[in-house]
């Protein structure tokens, strides 16, 4: 749950950072740099041995695109969270995950769950369009909500 709670916080803080830096891609760059600075001491603390890149080079080509997927996600969060709102952005992320993460076979119940998630996205966007913005946002995790 903590990891899930971090996602809208990340979207909101990175969106604000992107505005302050002048472009969302700078916020992506800074976000990934901060991640690197934070993970290195953790790896040292766990005394991780150096990786075996030779074995990784024998793997399929697509194992190397995870970093690109991270850039796509962070940049999408920067661009879309302020426009959609944190709740709608997260609902869209969950819907995308359900469509692309083929961990379990598709059945009618899973398809119905996905349909409900997409319906929730439509309802939250409709509610945002109908309700006028009455208060300025002071908390970066509540952008667009």
Image (cartoon, rainbow, N blue to C red):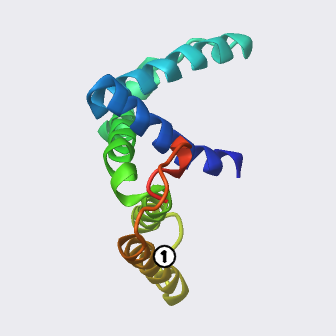
Instruction: Please report the residue visible at 52 percent of the width from the left and 40 percent of the height from the top.
Output: 10
Q: Residue 105 at x, y = what percent?
A: 50, 75
- Crowding at dot 1, Cα within 10 Å, few <14 / some 14-19 / many 20+, comes out as some
- Please state which of residues 55 and 116 is positioned toward the viewer in this rendering: 116
Residue highlighted by disc 1: 117
Indicate left or right for 120 with 61 as reference: right
- Please state which of residues 74 and 57 is positioned toward the viewer in this rendering: 74
Residue found at the very far front of the displayed protein: 134
Residue 55 shows in this picture = yes
Residue found at the very far bottom of the displayed protein: 108
Instruction: Please report the residue visible at 56 percent of the width from the left and 43 percent of the height from the top.
Output: 139
**For the image shown, how many numbered marks are present on the structure?**
1
Q: Residue 70 at x, y = what percent?
A: 40, 38
- Please state which of residues 51 and 70 is positioned toward the viewer in this rendering: 70
Residue 28 shows in this picture = no
Instruction: Please report the residue visible at 28 percent of the width from the left and 30 percent of the height from the top.
Output: 25
- Please state which of residues 82 and 31 is positioned toward the viewer in this rendering: 82
Judging from the image, what secondary structure is the residue with disc 1 in? helix
Q: Residue 21 at x, y = what percent?
A: 33, 23
Quadrant of the rendered structure where residue 38 is? top right
In the image, is residue 87 above or below residue 24?
below
Q: Residue 9 at x, y = what percent?
A: 56, 43
In the image, is residue 7 above or below residue 65?
below
In the image, is residue 31 above or below residue 103?
above
Indicate left or right for 50 with 56 as reference: right
Quadrant of the rendered structure where residue 122 is? bottom left
């Amino acid at each position: 749950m903590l990891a899930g709670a971090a996602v809208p916080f990340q979207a909101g803080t990175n969106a604000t950072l992107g505005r302050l830096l002048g472009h969302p891609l700078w916020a992506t760059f800074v976000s990934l740099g901060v991640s690197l600075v934070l993970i290195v001491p953790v790896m040292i603390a766990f005394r991780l041995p150096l990786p075996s890149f030779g074995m990784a080079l024998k793997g399929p080509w697509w194992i190397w695109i995870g970093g690109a997927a991270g850039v796509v996600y962070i940049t999408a969060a920067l661009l879309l969270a302020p426009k959609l709102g944190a709740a709608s952005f997260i609902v869209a992320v969950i819907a995308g995950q359900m469509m692309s993460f083929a961990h379990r076979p598709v059945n009618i119940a899973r398809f119905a769950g996905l349909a409900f998630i997409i319906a929730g996205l439509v309802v939250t966007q409709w509610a945002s369009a109908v309700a006028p913005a009455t208060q300025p946002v002071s908390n970066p995790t509540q952008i667009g909500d």
